[in-house]
Image (tube, rainbow, N blue to C red):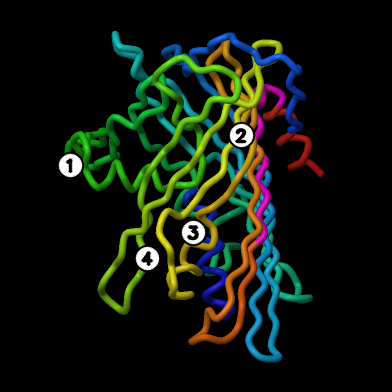
Amino acid sequence: MRSFVFCLLSLSICQLLAPVSVLHAEEDATSYSLRFKFTPGEFVHYTVDAQNQFTVQLNQDKETTINSTQTQKHYRVVAVDESGNATLETMIDRVQMSVQFNNGTPATFDSIQPVEKDLEQFIPIRRTIGRPSRIVYSPTGEVIAVLELQTTSEGSTFKETTKKGPKKLENDKTRSLGFLIPLPEDSIKVGDSWNEDFEAEVSVGDVLRKKVPIRRIFTLKSVEDDVAVITFKTKIMERLNDPQFSIQLIQKTPSGTIKLNLEKGVITSQDVSLDKAEVGVFNGQGAMRAVTHVVETLVDPASLAQKTAETDSE
């Protein structure tokens, strides 16, 4: 069971992390155009604090895995075209991670430490650090193109590996909430909602895979001081009678709150949580519960660098 749980933890990280204002009694009839705003050369930095707990029980055996992760990441606006579409270069800068099985000694990882100190289970995490990727986004957060770093004898360059509507773009949408979220095309009022539909794959036997439709529903909860508060929830749109399918999607239905600065066109925070349980996950027996809380916060790079230096000197 332990290797199975750690696999879930690794996938969660590689896919890699506020209170809601009370509305007035009268309905806010103001319409808002939610848009991301990009400036060439701009850097946007975030810190992500993620807490995950998995509990697996089979007969009298019970195992709890607690995972704590602190991540520093950023994106750079490489270019913006005449339509406002931006090429963003995204990167994970640092990961600090602790994994504890039951009451055992936690296994720890810090990407700034020498690679020789890495335990084997953290190798997939190490591979995500400092590896730039580029995605072309529209001002509404739509993924237009995915660029991959390709290295040849002539050097390294980013090249588009897909066209419109390919499988890779769909796969990109299935990732956990990351740097951007989809925004509505039209202006909306407080209380209005919009959807993001995508698919996730589950294994059917050793070879076959099944696509499961998922819908993420966003709602504009309030707008105050030029900050839009957006809530969201996630639903699996197909009835799954097999626990083996459900357990593969146990982390796919988070809910949370997102804050978007309308003037700057940038996300300032995301607060995402999940508490999901499945029974009969081992041939009709046993159960698993996943509890996750992720807080992502926009930070000033100068203060982040100072805080990192102070932490490293301790």
> What range is drawn magenta here?
291-303
Q: Position of residue 246 (x, y in %)?
A: 48, 68
Name the secondary structure under disc 2: strand
Instruction: Work out whether mark 1 precedes mark 2 in sequence or the reverse, and give the earlier one.
Output: 1
The dot on residue 153 is: 1
- Quick check: 146 above or below 21? below
Instruction: Work out whether mark 2 precedes mark 3 in sequence or the reverse, and give the earlier one.
Output: 3
Instruction: Work out whether mark 4 precedes mark 2 in sequence or the reverse, and give the earlier one.
Output: 4
Identify which residue, 251 or 218, lies in the foreground.
218
> Which amino acid type is shown beneath numbered disc 4?
Val
Which marked residue is nearer to the observer: mark 3 or mark 1?
3
**Image point (71%, 91%), residue name:** 60
Instruction: Work out whether mark 1 precedes mark 4 in sequence or the reverse, and give the earlier one.
Output: 1
Name the secondary structure under disc 4: strand
The secondary structure that most of the magenta stretch takes on is: strand
> Which amino acid type is shown beneath numbered disc 1?
Ser
- Quick check: 60 above or below 185? below
Q: Is residue 211 magenta?
A: no
Whether residues under marks 2 and 3 lie with C-beta atoms below 8 angstroms apart, the answer is: no
Identify the residue position indicated by label 4 in the image: 202
Tag 4: Cα neighbours inside 10 Å, few (<14), some, or many (≥20)?
A: some
Residue reaching furthest right?
Answer: 314
Res 27 quadrant in image: top right
> Which amino acid type is shown beneath numbered disc 3?
Leu
Identify the residue position indicated by label 3 in the image: 11
